[in-house]
Amino acid sequence: MAEAGALEARLYGRLEGREAVMLAGLPGMGYVAKQVVDYFIGEVKAIPFGEVYSRHLYPSVVVFNEGVMESLLDKKLYRFYLAKLPNLNLLLFTGEAQPSSAEAQRMLADEVARAAAEAGVKRVFTMAAYPVLGHVEEPRVYVVATSGSLLNELVGWGLTAMPGRSSISGVNGLLLEYVAQRGMEGACLLSETFIIDAPDVKAAAALVKSLNAGLKLGVDTSKIEEMAERFDEDLHRQYEQMRRAREVEKGLGYIY
């Protein structure tokens, strides 16, 4: 265990023998990035491959489940996982929450980038949400990258280069800066969503499909596609219920 107050990412070894790529995602708007990494961890049967140690990274909240407190101090909030796929070594990094301060977010991003570089990772892909004003039938996937050559390659996947000047907050964005400083390539894929505090499965599914096809991971995406379809059906059902409720209110307007 690291000393009190220290921040240290520990991996269980190096990634040798073939190309190494890391997918990283912490919770954010629509829980998009977290859902993507969790889905890949499950589908490729990734095994634990490292942890991040530091009490400074715990979020500034207390969590309760059915009214009973769950201690975050007893949990390892940030973990690495590894899957040895036929075409590459896939390192995955995720966690339960974003660090509560900008300083802690930068510290975590820097340490994760250091661990990835020392393990032999060459490319890092993060995920995030692209905020839109309302529901979209097919979420568009945007991309930003640490170099023009990588950006052009990813546009070749069918992604859309982020227009104009933009910024990505939190570790999902900051990680690219530290990745580049350590000589790795990095990119962030952003899926359209208007949902803030609940999981947007449809936005996550768009990213899963893009990464799976672009990196040739060979992962079965049918589960998350079915989840996205049910999510969309539920959303349309809620919209229809709201529309009918508004019509009823208008019809009863003479009472008021």
Image (cartoon, rainbow, N blue to C red):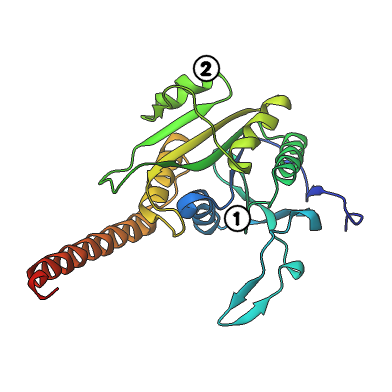
Quarter of the figure with the N terminus: bottom right
Q: Which residue lies furthest to the right in this view?
A: 3
Q: Give residue 141's position: percent from left, percent from top.
A: 39, 36
Residue at disc 2, secondary structure: helix
Crowding near the residue tagged with mark 2, few <14, some 14–19, many ≥20 C-alpha atoms within 10 Å: few
The residue nearer to you, when weighing 214 against 247, is 247
Task: Kindly indicate the quadrant of the structure image that contains residue 159.
Answer: top left
Q: Is residue 83 depicted above or below 187 in this figure? A: below
Crowding near the residue tagged with mark 1, few <14, some 14–19, many ≥20 C-alpha atoms within 10 Å: some
Q: Can residue 53 be seen in this view?
A: no
Image marks 2 and 1: residues in contact by CB distance under 8 Å: no
Give the residue drawn at x 52%, y 22%. 150
Q: Give residue 180's position: percent from left, percent from top.
A: 67, 26
Residue on which disc 1 sits: 46
Amino acid beneath label 2: Ser
Q: Residue furthest front?
A: 256
Q: Residue 149 carries which label?
A: 2
Q: Which residue lies furthest to the bottom in this view?
A: 67
Q: Is residue 51 depicted above or below 187 in this figure? A: below
Give the residue drawn at x 53%, y 56%. 38
Q: In this view, does 176 lie to the left or right of 132?
A: right
Q: Give residue 182's position: percent from left, percent from top.
A: 73, 27
Q: Is residue 8 depicted above or below 234 in this figure? A: above
| First-in-chain label (2 vs 1) | 1
Give the residue drawn at x 76%, y 67%. 73
